[in-house]
Image (cartoon, helix red, strand yellow):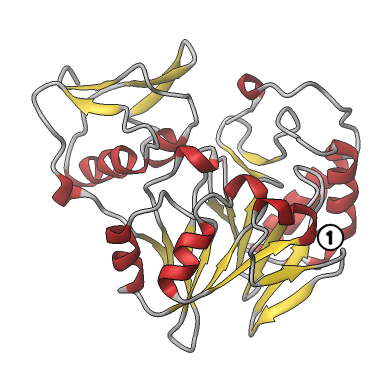
Amino acid sequence: MDDWYVDDRCTNCDVARQFAPELIGEADGKSQILRAPGGTAERRRLHAAVFACPTRSIRLRSGRVDRSLDPFPMELDDGLWICGHNSRHTAAANSYLLLRPSGTVMMIDTPRWSAELATRYQALGPVTDVLLTHRDHAAHGRRYADRFGARLWIHEGDLDGAPDADRVVRGLDPMEIADGVTVHPLPGHTRGSVLYLADDTYCFSGDSFYWSRAAGDLEVADSVTWYSIEEQAASLARTAGRLRFAWVLPGHGDRHRLPAAEMSRRLRALTERAALLAPRPVDFTAVRW
């Protein structure tokens, strides 16, 4: 434990704690090392936290972290990877890669920009689409799309976040954008927030909802709502019955897998809770990670 520490650049974004919650905790508004890793699996999780951290705040007193231990992209499920290397320019959002039956790949939201990382991601298959969930996560979308020769997607409500997008989602109706992949507009967190549903299994929820380790349940970050919590509640009420998924894969907050029927039950319950929420000032410290 004495060799690992968290430096003062930490923004308490929770990314590192998602990867190694048994090794990294929270105290005084930032992450802290709880103990040294024990065994190969824990060392791998700690290095995932190291290389996901957007401020590179998890460090070794004895020297530099070995870059050969970078595990990203890291496979979460068959054909599903998390990109790691979260970016300060996307508020430290998680991003994902999804392999399609054709052998092509979709990127959902973006990691920090790096040509070397782009090459790694392309090794999984040709990337055809970069799917943005909303404006906060758009920072590197154009660069990745151009590098891949891919289409960049965003909703019209957040088009000023990616004004040169190749595909613009319009209105509130769900739309199939590829075989087995549907976009569902969910205005609330921002005017143009959407989620992407793939194969009735994977829900890339952006910042519309997430899995809270603290609550052990699906939650909305009502203390970080830029557009309207009332609209977010209405979006959930309109959309929840259309969604079937086993994985929730958010931009912020934890990801989690449950049987689809249990996820549906929890999403219905979240919809009921969200209907009771009132507007409040933006307060990042109030999020229940």
In this rendering, would 238 be left or right of 210? Answer: right
Q: Secondary structure at mark 1?
A: helix
Q: Residue furthest bottom?
A: 102
Residue denoted by label 1: 239
Query: In this view of the protein, can residue 78 be seen by the observer?
Result: no
* Looking at the image, residue 149 lies above or below residue 17: below
Measuring from the top left, give residue 142's x and y in whole percent.
Answer: 52, 61
Kindly identify the residue that appears in the image at 64 percent across and 81 percent down: 180
Left or right side of 74 for 141: right
Q: Residue at x 73, y 79 (%)?
A: 176
Residue, far top: 28
Q: Quadrant of the N terminus?
A: top left
The answer to whether 84 appears left or right of 180 in the picture is left
- For badge 1, the amino acid type reads Thr
Q: Residue furthest front?
A: 164
Measured along the vertical axis of the image, is residue 13 above or below residue 93? above
Position of the C terminus by quadrant: top right
Q: Position of residue 174 (x, y in %)?
A: 81, 70
Could you say which is closer to the camera, residue 111 or residue 60? 111
Residue in the image at 23% along x and 27% along y = 59
* Quarter of the figure with residue 66: top left
In this rendering, is residue 157 above or below 79?
Answer: above
Residue 272: % across, % down: 87, 43
Residue sitting at x 17%, y 41%: 39
Percent x, y for residue 162? Answer: 64, 57
